[in-house]
Image (spheres, rainbow, N blue to C red):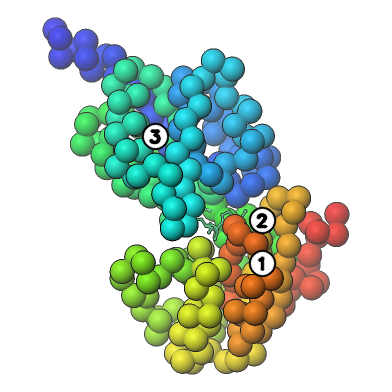
Amino acid sequence: MTNNLTSLNRGFVSLVGAGPGDAELLTVKGYRVIGQADVVVYDRLVSAEILALANDKAEMIYVGKKLDFHCVPQQQINQLLVDKALEGKRVVRLKGGDSFIFGRGGEELEILAEHNIRFEVVPGITAAVGATAYAGIPLTHREHAQAVQFITGHVQKDGQEIDWHAVAQSNATLVFYMGLKQSGYIADKLLTHGLSQDMPCAIIENGTRREQKVHRGDLVDLAILAKQAQSPALIVVGSVTTLHEKLDWFESC
Ligand code: SAH
């Protein structure tokens, strides 16, 4: 009986991707579950407009992280989700972009699964998709790129080195997340593994937000471009980036 009651009282966690910035890029499903939540546990990159969709009575808990500076350790976030769910709450775990793309969504769900807590995943538009769309840079294009790679630029601290040989493909578009600080290293590796110095690239800062800026140049100048860019930013390497000049629609709106 007690066990039955405990399982009935268990809450539910929705892992929701908030998209890259523009609040209108939230999914209809994300919009609904945020409005129904008792507790919203959110990260730094979630916009104020999206947080405002929560019920006035919802408990709002900020657990944001910055590169090299973790406000709340991951283990504590995991525990918080478990605790709130065990209190029987409807919890929304809200993250920037998509939770499964460099968002540690998988790690958080593993802990919930280990505690037999029910959950769902509501995908979001990841920065690579949103920011390039708003910059007029198609990730694939028959004349430019037949593949796309999403790569973490947070290379050294993560421990595992990237397989640069596999990454440095001139017929693929490369999108580096969290790469601004490591841009010099990334460019060096791509050049030594065969990409040419004049391979076009772009840095998109604040993608899909009103402050969005696109910096364009060649791979050899990537570190210089990165110095002019603000975080959050994506590095895009590949000849598709030249289409920005022709297809840019957002900054000129
Ligand atoms: N889960 C997120 C990524 C989190 S990692 C997603 O799917 O988008 C954080 C990195 O995402 C930042 O360092 C930056 O590289 C990128 N990023 C997030 N929002 C961005 C935005 N609006 N414009 C450009 N890059 C962004």
Q: Is residue 64 above or below residue 137?
A: above
Task: Tell me whether the residue at label 3 lies in contact with that at label 2, contact meaning CB atoms closer than 8 angstroms.
Answer: no
Q: In which quarter of the image is residue 120?
A: top left
Q: Dot 1 corresponds to which residue?
A: 229
Q: Residue at x 34, y 45 (%)?
A: 74
Secondary structure state at the residue bearing disc 3: strand
Task: Measuring from the top left, give residue 5's x and y in whole percent.
Answer: 21, 10
Secondary structure state at the residue bearing disc 1: loop
Task: Measuring from the top left, give residue 209's x and y in whole percent.
Answer: 71, 50
Disc on res. 120: 3
Q: In which quarter of the image is the C terminus?
A: bottom right
Q: In which quarter of the image is residue 54?
A: top right
Cα–Cα span, label 1 and label 2: 9 Å
Residue pushed farthest right? 253
Of residue 212 and residue 70, the one placed in the foreground of this image is 70
Q: Can residue 252 be seen in this view?
A: yes
Q: How many labels does the image show?
A: 3
Q: Dot 2 corresponds to which residue?
A: 206
Cα–Cα span, label 1 and label 3: 36 Å
| Residue type at the position of mark 2 | Asn
Secondary structure state at the residue bearing disc 2: loop
Q: Locate ligand 1 by image quadrant.
A: bottom right
Within 8 Å of ligand 1, the CB of disc 2? Answer: yes
Q: In which quarter of the image is residue 171?
A: bottom right
Q: Which residue is drawn at 46% across and 48% down?
A: 65
